[in-house]
């Protein structure tokens, strides 16, 4: 699943995650599925590398209302972590 599709998967469940009490946490997703939640992006990134290495893309996103989202981070195999404002 490419990173755009993973972002759409996250966008489709964002409100539910907030309602479940995950606001402010970072979610690690792979193939559109939630892997786990973390207090910081660094922990989520480390776990993503541990699980998927450099071979498979994964998404790390902060769970927050869309109007408050500051940045999106994504990773593509063989490339550095990218953060967009």
Image (cartoon, rainbow, N blue to C red):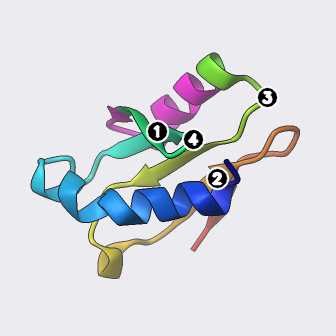
Element marked by disc 1:
strand
Q: CA distance from mark 2 to mark 3?
A: 13 Å
Is 35 positioned to the left or the right of 42 in the image?
left
Residue 3 image position (x, y, % from top left): 66, 55
Residue 22 image position (x, y, % from top left): 20, 47
The verdict on residue 80 being magenta is no
Closer to us: 82 or 3: 3
How many C-alpha atoms fall within 10 Å of the one at disc 1: few (<14), some, or many (≥20)? many
Q: Residue at x 57, y 41 (%)?
A: 31
Q: Are marks 2 and 1 in contact (CB under 8 Å)?
A: no
Residue 51 against residue 6 in the figure, above or below: above
Between marks 4 and 1 in the image, the one whose residue lies nearer the viewer: 4
Residue 49 against residue 11 in the figure, above or below: above
Q: Quadrant of residue 16?
A: bottom left
Q: Which residue is mark 4?
A: 31
Q: Residue at x 26, y 53 (%)?
A: 24
Magenta part of the chain: 37-49
Residue 50 against residue 23 in the figure, above or below: above
Residue 45 image position (x, y, % from top left): 57, 34
Q: CA distance from mark 3 to mark 4?
A: 15 Å
Element marked by disc 2:
strand
């Amino acid at each position: 699943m490419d990173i755009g599709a993973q972002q759409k998967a996250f966008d489709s469940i964002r409100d539910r995650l907030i309602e479940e009490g995950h606001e402010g946490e970072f979610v690690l997703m792979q193939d559109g599925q939630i892997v786990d939640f973390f207090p910081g992006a660094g922990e989520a990134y480390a776990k993503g590398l541990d699980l998927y290495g450099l071979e498979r893309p994964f998404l790390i996103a902060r769970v927050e209302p869309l109007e408050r989202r500051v940045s999106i981070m994504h990773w593509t195999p063989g490339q550095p972590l990218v953060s967009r404002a």
